Amino acid sequence: MLNSHPVVAAKPAKKIQIASESWTKVQALRQCEISARQLQSWERQGLIAAKQNYAFEDLLELRVLSRLKELGISSTKLQEVFSIMRGKLASDSNPLTELRVYVEGKRIRVQTGGKKMEALSGQLLLDFDQAALRRLLSFPSSQPDAPSDLRRAKAESESWFQRGLELEHSGTDKREAIEAYEKALECNPALAGALVNIGTIYFNARKWRESEKFYQQAIAADPAYPLAHFNLANLHDELGRTSLAIQHYKKAMELQPGYADAHYNLALLFQTRGRAMEAMRHWKQYLALDSNTQWAAIAKREMAKLKESALVVKRTALTPLNPT
């Protein structure tokens, strides 16, 4: 059985992560082939929310906006249409994914909830039907004219990856999750998230050799994937390979500035190795990114321990020796 066992680690425990359908801003820009300046412009205009991590639906929005830009639809016109439509939709709806927009002559017409509404005049050549969007914009293919068998393979890979996540969370035998991830990899051998998650299942089962193999494969598949470096750092730390652990934690933070969990685990590593000043620096950086969670409470507690230890050392050094 490969069901998870408790990980033996210094107290407090380090953070462990699995891959989900989530991408950093840098990865999202690369996959959607848009510039940081263009994204900032859309954020300022309220066309897409500013964030550091992107789910599949967020990437879908970016791809739609990118395609609309290619078709010559101005951001101003999009703002007008979305402003009108948001007033007619539920507060949590998103015009990029909830609407069907189509052209009748020179008029833009919008359909939502089975009702048709007239929007602004103009020319729009993209159908926002959800199923059609997924076929057209299937992530992560950056080639809209990619062969249909490639698009199908990527869609099937995504489906098996999601199945693997569901099986992991369901508490069933982890072998079933591994099988789902392996099927995802059959469709897309470069799916780093599936490789990372298999590695993490083995990590939690304390099967270090297997875990390291899959983490290394994930890095080979996508060297710029921060989570692969983060989890490999956890493994090196677990095995006492301090230099390698530090190297990969720092690589994860280089690839994803503001990677709070990497600061947390690196602070813990330095603290358990007696490197108090370096630990304090990373605890502070962690708390600058996360100040209100239970993990933040642990970070504050550990910082207090380090400060108290430093005071004890200072008092001891200043205490005069008793005359003999």
Image: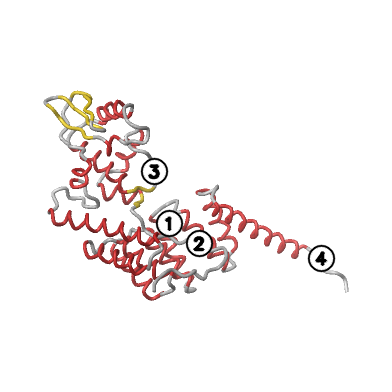
Q: Amino acid at mark 2?
A: Leu
Q: Which residue bears the numbered disc 2?
A: 266
Rendered position, 89 above or below 242: above
User: Dividing the image into 4 quarters, which one contains the N terminus?
Assistant: bottom left
Q: Amino acid at mark 4?
A: Pro
Q: Secondary structure at mark 4?
A: loop
Measured in 3D between alpha carbons, the distance from the residue under mark 1 to the one under mark 2, in whole angstroms, is: 10 Å
Query: Answer yes or no: do the residues labelled 1 and 2 have beta carbons within 8 Å?
Result: yes
Q: Which residue bears the numbered disc 4?
A: 320
Residue that appears at 59% across and 60% down: 277
Measured in 3D between alpha carbons, the distance from the residue under mark 2 to the one under mark 3, in whole angstroms, is: 24 Å
Q: Which residue bears the numbered disc 3?
A: 51
Q: Position of residue 241 (x, y in %)?
A: 47, 73
Query: Answer yes or no: do the residues labelled 2 and 3 have beta carbons within 8 Å?
Result: no
Measured in 3D between alpha carbons, the distance from the residue under mark 4 to the one under mark 3, in whole angstroms, is: 56 Å
Q: Residues within 10 Å of mark 3 (few under 14, many from 20)?
A: few
Residue that appears at 65% across and 59% down: 305
Q: In the rendered structure, which disc, 4 or 2, sits on the residue that comes first in sequence?
A: 2
Q: In the rendered structure, which disc, 2 or 3, sits on the residue that comes first in sequence?
A: 3
Q: In the rendered structure, which disc, 3 or 1, sits on the residue that comes first in sequence?
A: 3
Query: Answer yes or no: do the residues labelled 4 and 3 have beta carbons within 8 Å?
Result: no
Q: In the rendered structure, which disc, 4 or 3, sits on the residue that comes first in sequence?
A: 3
Look at discs 2 and 3 and give the one toward the viewer: 3
**Residue 57 location, quadrant:** top left
Q: Which residue bears the numbered disc 1?
A: 253
Choose between 311 and 11: the one closer to the eye.
11
Measured in 3D between alpha carbons, the distance from the residue under mark 1 to the one under mark 4, in whole angstroms, is: 45 Å
Q: Amino acid at mark 1?
A: Met
Q: Position of residue 294 (x, y in %)?
A: 55, 53
Rendered position, 253 above or below 114: below
123 vs 286, left or right, is left
